[in-house]
Amino acid sequence: MNTKPQSSRTAWLTLLLAGAFEVGYALSVGGSHAFTVWQWSVAAAVFFLLTLWALSQALRTIEVSIGYATWAGLGSAGAALLGPVFFNESLAPTKTLWLAVTITGVIYLKLADRQPNPT
């Protein structure tokens, strides 16, 4: 078992990957129609396992408070942005505004995770 912490850059890339898997999970659950469509249901199970694995790897280095909020924000924003593409959902200007706020928050969380420069 490898317990060596990963670099901050690798952890953040892994967290972005976890966010992408979370988007896949959310869209797959939507497409599964309460797990009645088996192809979407299998995809949801796979994305669920992948997102939890990637998130757990990232949280070995990134603080849970920052990592979880970032992961949830990426998943929410990604699902909201891709919902109209896959499921003919609406993307009203108000929803777009709040997605921009969410994405801005994720960026500032990344900046908050920077280690202070030694003086």
Image (cartoon, helix red, strand yellow):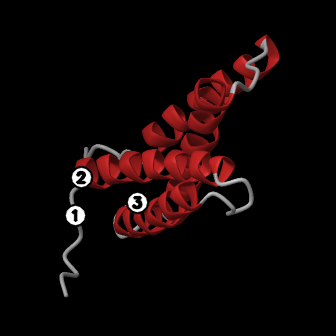
Tag 3: amino acid: Ile
Residue 10, horizontal then vertical, whole percent: 24, 52
Label 2 Cα neighbours within 10 Å, binned few <14 / some 14-19 / many ≥20: some
Asked whether the beta carbons under mark 2 and mark 1 sit within 8 Å of each other, the answer is yes
Q: Quadrant of the N terminus?
A: bottom left
Residue found 30% across the figure and 47% down from its top: 13
Tell me the distance, in whole angstroms, between the alpha carbons under discs 2 and 1: 6 Å
Residue 86, horizontal then vertical, whole percent: 59, 31
Q: Of callouts 1 and 3, which one flags the residue occurring earlier in the amino acid sequence?
A: 1
Is residue 72 something that shows in the picture?
no
Q: Is residue 112 above or below residue 3?
A: above
In this orientation, which residue lies closer to the viewer: 49 or 8?
Answer: 49
Secondary structure of residue under mark 1: loop
Secondary structure of residue under mark 2: helix
Residue found 67% across the figure and 63% down from its top: 35
Residue where numbered disc 2 is placed: 10
Residue where numbered disc 3 is placed: 62
In this orientation, which residue lies closer to the viewer: 4 or 54?
Answer: 54
Residue where numbered disc 1 is placed: 6
Tag 1: amino acid: Gln
